[in-house]
Image: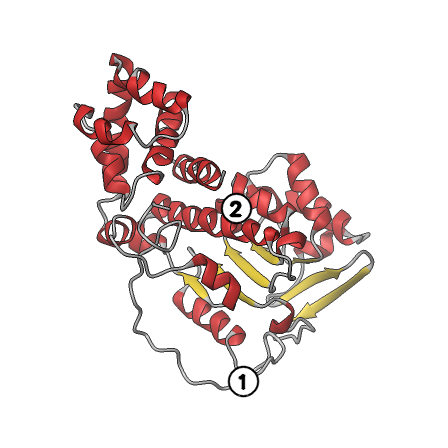
Amino acid sequence: MFINGLASDLTAAFAANMQPEMTESQYIMLRNLFMAVFYQENSTILDVLDLLSDDPKLKLKSLLGNLPTKPLFNYFSEDYLSADAKRTRRTLRGRLNSFLIPKPLYESLCAQSCEIDFREILSQGKYVLVKATTTSLGTYEAVTIGNILHSIFSKYAFERLALNEPAKPFFVYFDEAQYYMSEPVERALTGARKTGVSYTLAHHELGQTGMSPSAQRTLINNANVKIYGSLKWKDMKDGADILGLDDRIALGTVKPGQFYIKAGKERVFLKQFPVRFSIKKGGFGKGFFVNAYAKTEETKAMLKRITKSAPPLMYEKTVEPEISKKSKSFNFNPHGNMPFSL
């Protein structure tokens, strides 16, 4: 079940922002390829590309004997070799090749070893900062990497439900959250209380999340803390209703650095940065950032506030040594063993 769900989530991550949109046949083929490759030993995404070649029969011989179900076997022994499937394979091969052209993506997704163990991250409370910026990777690539990493992470988060002891608290922060409102994120939000994973979603407009109105309303109603400032006119009524304010204009006239915060059902305050929150890092645990759009200085400042050895209140003015500018490239796979293998 772990492999089946992960294959679907990774396919959704590639398809979420792909232009032109992925067709149904392309989606099914890529999902089945991920699932089939996951059952092979020491496989990587390069094996997926090999199976998308014009003549994949030689590669299929070693694949067919390891497939877990008869329907998947029938797909690769019959449907996958049809004339229509050949055109689909060519299109998918071009799309995946294009995605893997940037060196950082190739080195991470096609690596033969892994530097990230998601089980260890969750069990030991380690920090992970994903600085997949659009300037270095491109918009589609940065968002896709964020969604891929979160898909893998969320699988292990739900795996913690099988443990008898209480899960250690952990948090996920999404900057420009509207780019990550995928099915795995929605599922993780609904299961946050069970898994011990808390989410912070930062975005500029109420309608940016890309979710249906009913799903967006569910998300807003279940958020423990809501923070709003300087909303555009079209969002002021919704924001005022959520905060319980009589005057929607107040949301459009707040000064720079001011914001409204609602904690719980009734308490609403107008605040000014810098401000002391009564939310300490001990309440969240250590966490996982997807910070695709924020400036480097903003990312460093946020990380410094949370990684302090003592638990001071967030946004408190302090003087600290700079974080080293050196960064280590990372490789990852869904198991923490070999890329895309279990």
Could you say which quadrant of the image residue 86 lies in? top left
Q: Which residue is mark 1?
A: 318
- Image point 46% across, 39% down: which residue? 9
- Residue 281 appears at what percent x and percent y? 60, 72
SS state under label 1: loop
Q: Look at label 1 and name its amino acid.
A: Thr
- Image point 50% across, 70% down: which residue? 302
- Image point 26% across, 25% down: which residue? 89
Name, please, the residue furthest toward the front.
65
Is residue 104 placed above or below 76 in the rendered structure?
below
Colour pattern of the rendering: secondary structure
Q: Is residue 250 visible?
A: yes
Side (left or right) of 1 relative to 267:
left
- Residue 261 appears at what percent x and percent y? 71, 62
Side (left or right) of 13 relative to 331:
right
Q: Foreground: 111 or 58? A: 58
SS state under label 2: helix
Q: Is residue 204 visible?
A: no
Dot 1, crowdedness within 10 Å: few (<14), some or many (≥20)?
Answer: few
Side (left or right) of 320 relative to 337:
right
Which disc number belongs to residue 136?
A: none
Q: CA distance from mark 2 to mark 1?
A: 31 Å
Is residue 295 placed above or below 333 in the rendered structure?
below
- Residue 25 appears at what percent x and percent y? 37, 21
- Residue 317 appears at what percent x and percent y? 57, 82
Q: Which residue is mark 2?
A: 178
Q: Foreground: 135 or 52? A: 52
Is residue 284 placed above or below 12 in the rendered structure?
below
- Image point 32% across, 16% down: which residue? 79
Q: Look at label 2 and name its amino acid.
A: Gln
